[in-house]
Amino acid sequence: MPSTYNPSTRLKISADLGFLSVIYFITHSYFQPGIDVLSNTSWLALGLSLFSWFIAGRSMGLYKDFRAIVFSIEWTVFVKSLLLYSLIISFVLTLLVNGYPFRMMQLLTQVTLIFISFPIQKLAIRLFMKRIRNSSQMSRKVLIVGADDSGLQFYKNYVKDNLYGYSLAGFVDDTVNPSINGQYLGKTSDIDKVIASHEFEDIVVATTLKDDSQLEKIIIAGEREGKRVKIIPQYQRFSTGKIRVSTMGSMPIITLRSLPLDLMDSKIIKRAFDIVFSSLVIVFVLSWLFPIIALLIRLSSKGPALFRQERWGLNNKPIICYKFRSMVPSSADVDEKGVYQQAKRNDPRITKIGAFLRKTNLDELPQFFNVLIGTMSVVGPRPHPVPLNLQSKESIENYMMRHLVKPGITGWAQVNGYRGETRDSYLMKKRVEHDVWYLENWTFWLDLQIIIQTLVNMVKGEKNAF
């Protein structure tokens, strides 16, 4: 069964770092003949190069289990990883390694050699691992307990094509399934007879048994005859497949919703990008645009230029969210019934300059200060006002899952049209669906895509921006 670091994955990581080291020494010797290839500076540059490749590959998903996926998908992920690596290493070698004369031609040559050689070695690893799995010494026969949907899914995905080194011995189940084509070996109560009369090495329990005594009998019978017993936990119905099994000390822990941003290197990449991007916006845009917008707001209506509102951030912790004020100061967040008043089309509370700011998304610009101090991210689920959170958390499934990551200035839901008023519960459900998809499928590449889509939408205009 697949794991995060199976032998194939470790081989791929080792091969990548080995190839990259050889390419580094080749390009270094050619472009830097005056610098000793064994100097401390050269070793530091090599170490940072290897680390940058590993970070780029991990963040793009290059070291996931691709054995059941066509090579074109792995190649696409490799290209994305290579582009991210090029950005990281050019920055690192230019600014962080003193005494290393960085040359763009050296980087281009190195990237070209990686582009040519890495796909070849990845194909070779695929063929090598497939040959090993198909060998009689490595192939293991498996008895599947459960001929229902779970058992058949395990067979089709992990046994049928021998991609994971398994061949089928047969099924046992208390109910006969005619679709298993004569591979039914008996009931679970007959497990002793099945083990005695058939050859196999592993038993995979792929279904939910009626009680623990059935499972205990299978484990005892299997281990008495030297069979390895594996159990597929039946928690898929509570999750979307992002399940992670780990240990805390000696205790096994099953995480039903494992996210890319749970990984420390992913957090570092996202935070570093947030700091750089927000700093650039503040220095080159807000430094001159902020006083102009603030003056226009003050001239259009009395009151402060900035609007401060408490919202929920990472892990439901309250944060203060900043925006340019777009409504009259006397606007109330809730009506006389205590219901949160969302901004709507032709809302009388919105000022003339406020309507322009909301239409162009310029009212959100002060939130780049939130990003810089770390309470928000450039990309993430949009933070909602507290009353709207309280209204929605009880009625919208998975609503609070949005707060497993930092809120963002823009997000996957917004660029797909789910922004603005959400009085219709269907619109809020779709927004939450997109937000949850984002946090389960985050990549640095996806963040860049969302930022570009946001800029495009700002130029062409959005019908729900009011």
Image (tube, helix red, strand yellow):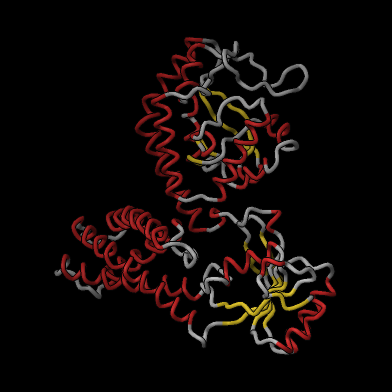
* Quadrant in the rendering for residue 111: bottom left
Measured as percent of width and height from the top left, residue 203 is found at: 68, 78
Measured as percent of width and height from the top left, residue 213 is found at: 85, 75
At 37% across and 38% down in the image, what residue appears? 280
Q: Nearer the viewer, residue 103 or 395?
A: 395
At 29% across and 60% down in the image, what residue appears? 97
At 44% across and 49% down in the image, what residue appears? 444
* Quadrant in the rendering for residue 79: bottom left
* Quadrant in the rendering for residue 72: bottom left
On screen, 449 above or below 163? Answer: above
Q: Nearer the viewer, residue 104 or 287?
A: 104
Measured as percent of width and height from the top left, residue 115 is found at: 28, 62
Q: Nearer the viewer, residue 152 or 1?
A: 152
Q: Is residue 76 left or right of residue 94?
A: right
Measured as percent of width and height from the top left, residue 290 is found at: 42, 24
Image quadrant where one finds the N terminus: bottom right
Q: Is residue 395 left or right of residue 39?
A: right
At 29% across and 64% down in the image, what residue appears? 114
